[in-house]
Image (spheres, rainbow, N blue to C red):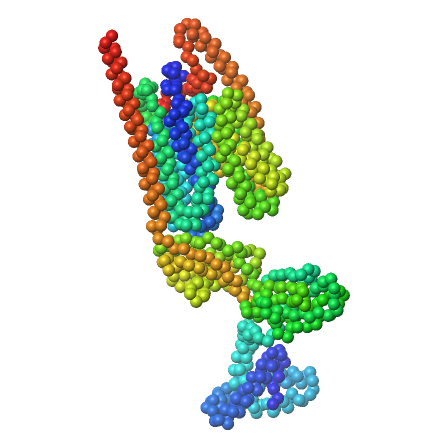
Amino acid sequence: MQSMKLQHGMERELCLSVCVIQLWMESATRKLQGDTRAASLLQLKGEGGGLVVLLHDAASRETRKRSSERPAHRGDRGIIIMSAIRKQLSFQILLLFISCRNINTKTLGATAPPLDPTAPLQKLERSYVLKGDSHTEKVELLNPVSLVLMCTWTGSQNKPTNITGFWSKDGKEIENSRVTVQLENKQYNLKRTFSIASEADLGSYSCDFGGEAKINFVLAVPQMGDERDKPIVSYLGDSVVVPCKLDDSKPTPNTWNWYRANETGKEQIIAGQKFSIKNDEKKTKLVIHDLTADDSGLYYCGAVYGVGITMGRVELKVISFFEPLKPFIAILVEVIILVAAILLYEKSRSKKDYTAAGHLGKITDQRRALR
Amino acid sequence: MSPAPADPLEYKPLDGGWGWMVVIGAHISIGFAYATPKVLSIFFNEIQQDLGSSFSEIALISSIMLAAMYAGGPVSSAMVNRFGSRPIVMLGGLLCGVSMITASFGTSIIYLYFCIGVIGGCGLSLNLNASLIIISKYFLKRRPLANGLAMAGSPVFLCVLAPFNQYLLVNFGWRGSLLILGGLMLHCCVAGALMRPVPLPCKPPSYALEKTVEEQPNSGNTKLKKRFVKNAKKFLDFSLFKDRGFVIYLIGSIMFIFGAYAPIVFLSAYAKSQGVEEYSAAYLLSIMGFVDMFVRPGTGLIANSKLVRPRIQYFFSFALVFNGTCHLLCPLIKSYAFLVVYAVFFGIGFGMVFALIFECLMDLMGSQRFPRAVGLVTIIECFPMLLGPPAAGLLVDVYHDYKYLFLMCGSVILTGGLFLFVMNIYNYHMLDKERQKQVRASEVEMKLTPQAGTGQTEPEAKERNVALRDPENTETTD
C-alpha cells in the first residue's frame, strides 16, 4: 500500500508508515474477526468526521503545495486512492500520529538496548621480549577484554630453525595450541588471542618455547593493598566499623560486597538491621551493630570489577568487658599495696625517730636536771 | 623590701638519702607527663574509625592535653606552695587515672576532648610542676644530676609505653587499652607517696603576719578587689619579669620550644620523602629516644661537675647552639646512614637541652622563687609549643620541601642559643658587680656587728644571694 508521506522529518515518515501498515494489518484482521473496535471506528467515523475533514484538508493543502512545486498529478492520485482508506483509518491514524510523536521522543531517551553478547570485546595487547630463561609479567584487568598475548624469544646458544611452542593456562597445556615456530630475524614469536570474560578466565597464561623458555602472564584484578594482619577488637553489645581500602593507585571498582567466612566458604552479607554497608569509591565500611560472640571471625570485602572480584581480609575479635578489667584490677591492687607500704614504712620510721628523739630528749633533760 | 629574714634556707637540703627515692618518684611522674600525649597517638587510628571523625579532629586530643598540661602550671605551683608536693602528685595521678578510665567508655569525640584532653592534661600538669618543685627542695649540691635523672623519665617511658600500647591495642582494642593505661597512670600516686614532705623545723612567723594582713577589716569592694589581686598574684607572679636573668631565660626557652618539636613531628615524613621506607623512618625516632635516655643523666653528671656548675647557663646556651646547628645541617643529608647519624646527634642535643632546661631555671631563681617561676614559664611556653609544629607544617605546605622546615627550626634555636650566650655574659657581669657591692656592704656591716662566719659552699652562697634579691621572701615553703 502506498504509505502516506508527509514532508516533515524522516522519523515521522517512517514512524507513520510503520504505524499505518500496522494499523492497516490490524484493522484488516479485525474486520475479518468482526471486532467491536472496527464497529466503534465506524461510529467514530461519524463523530470524527470533522477530524477526517481536517486531515483531508491538511493533506489537500500539502498536495496543493506539492502541485505548486511539481505539476505532477501523482500526489493527487495518491490522495484520491487514500481517501477511501483514510475514512476508516483516519481517526486511528491521528491518534497514532500523536502517540507516535510521543513514542518518537521517548525512544530517544529510552534505555539503550541490552548489550549484544556477541558484540566485540575491548582489545588489549600485551607483549614481552624474553632474553633469559623465564619471566613473569603481571597484567591487571578490570573488564572483559579480548587479550592478545605476544611472546618473543631471542633464543638460546644454538638456534634451531624450528621449535615447538605451546600455550598453557595455570600449568595445564591448552589444547591445540602446539605450533611450530620459525626463526624470524633471530627471534621466535608466539601470539595468541584469549577472550577473558569472567573470573574463570583469569589466571596464569604461559607461552612455552620448546620447554626451554617460558613467559608467564599473570592475569588478575587489581589486588588489595597490604592486608591488615592484626585483628580488630571490639566488645559485646558495642558496634564496630570494619574498614577496607583500596590503594589510591588502583582503579575504582564498580561496587563493593562484603562476605562472612563460614564452614562452606564465603557467604554474602546483606545490609539490614544488624549490618550496614557504606561505600565510598575506593573505601568501604561495614558497620556491625549489637555485637555478639558469634560475630567474631573472618570478614572479606570484595571489590567488584567487570571481570572479577578482588578480596581483602579482616579479622574481628569480640571480647567481653571482663577481659581488660582483670589486668586493670590487678594493677589497681598493686598500686594500693605500694602506696600503703610506702606510707606505713614512713610512719614506722617517723615513730622510731620520735621515740629516739624522745629518748634523747629524756637523756638531755636528765642531764640538765643533774646539773 | 621586706625586713631581712632569717637564713632563707631553714634546712639543709638532703642531697641524697631519701632524695634518691624522690628522684625515682619524679622520674615516674615526669615520664608519664611527657610521654602520654605522644603515645596516645597510637590509638588514634582505631578511635578515628570507631567514632567516624577526621584525623585532625582526633589529633586535637593530644594538643588539648599538652595545652592543658602547660597552662595548668601556675595553678599547680600555687597548690604545691599551699599543700606540698605529695598530695598534689597523688591528686594528679588520680585525675589522670580517672580521665583514662572514663575515656574508655567514650562514644563521641567531644567526650574524649574533655576526658583525655582537659582532665588528663590537668592531672599531668599537677604531676609535672610538683615533681620539679620537690627536686629543687631536696637537692642543691647534686641538683643537676637529680634533674637529669628525673627528666630522663620522658624518653624511658616513651620507649616503654610505645610498644606496650601496641600490644594492648592488639589484645584489647582501644577501649580496653585506655582502661589499662588509666590503671598504669595510677602509679603516679605511688610516685607521690614517695615524695615525703621536707621537714620544716618550725612554721616561719611571716605566715602569721600574712594571715593578720588578710583579716584586716576593709570596706566592701576594695576588700574583694584586694583579695582577688592577691589570689591572682599567688598564681601568676608578674614581678618576676623584673628579674633580668628570668627574662633572658624566658626568651631563650621560648625560641627553643618553638623550633624543638617540629623536627620530631616531621622527621619520619622527611625520611620517607628522601626514599627511606616506612619502618626504617619510624626507627629513626626510636633511635633518637634511645640516645636521649642516656644523654639526660649524662648531661646532669657533666653539669654537676666543678668546672661546669658555676657556668651552667653557658652550657645551656651551648646545648641550644648544638641543637640548632644539627637541624641546619639536616637538609644536606640525603642517605639513610647519615639520617641515622642525624638522629643520634638530634637525640644528644635534645637530651642536653631538656636535662638543663629546668636546672637553669632553678639556678637562676633559687628554690624559693622556683615554684612561681616554673608556673609562669610553663604557661608562657604553651604558646610556642602549640604554634611551632603547625607553623612548620605551613612551610612544608607552601614550599613543598622539608628543607625550609629544618632551616627555620635550626635558625630559631641557634639564634636563641646565641642570644642566651651573649646575654648571659652581660648578666653574669652585672651579677658580679652587684655581688661586689653586697660584699662591700656586708663587710661594713660585719665591722659594726660581729657575726660567726657561716661556712657556705658556692651553690649555697648563691642560693642565699638569690633569695636575698627576692622581694617577696615571706611565702611558706614545704
Residue at the extreme top of the image, as rendered? B448
> Is A335 or A213 nearer to us in this picture?
A213
> Is A207 or B164 nearer to us in this picture?
A207
Residue B98, x across and y down, in percent: 35, 41
Q: Picture quarter containing residue B465?
A: top left
Residue positioned 67% across, 85% down in the render:
A67
Q: Residue B478 vs residue B43: left or right?
A: left
Query: Which quadrant is home to the N terminus of chain A?
Result: bottom right
Q: Is residue A273 above or below residue B7?
A: below
Residue positioned 45% across, 34% down in the render:
B153
Residue B158, x across and y down, in percent: 46, 39
Query: Which quadrant is home to the C terminus of chain A?
Result: top left
Q: Residue A341 vs residue A222: left or right?
A: left
Residue A309, x across and y down, in percent: 52, 64
Residue at the extreme right of the image, as rendered? A185
Number of marks in the image? 0
Residue positioned 46% across, 27% down in the render:
B145
Residue at the extreme front of the image, as rendered? A158
> Is B283 or B471 nearer to us in this picture?
B283
Residue B55, x across and y down, in percent: 48, 48
Q: Picture quarter containing residue B284?
A: top right
Residue positioned 66% across, 89% down in the render:
A74
Q: Picture quarter containing residue B74?
A: top left
> Is B228 or A306 nearer to us in this picture?
A306
Q: Is residue A84 above or below residue A346?
A: below
- The answer to whether residue A280 is seen in the rendering is no
- The answer to whether residue A29 is seen in the rendering is yes
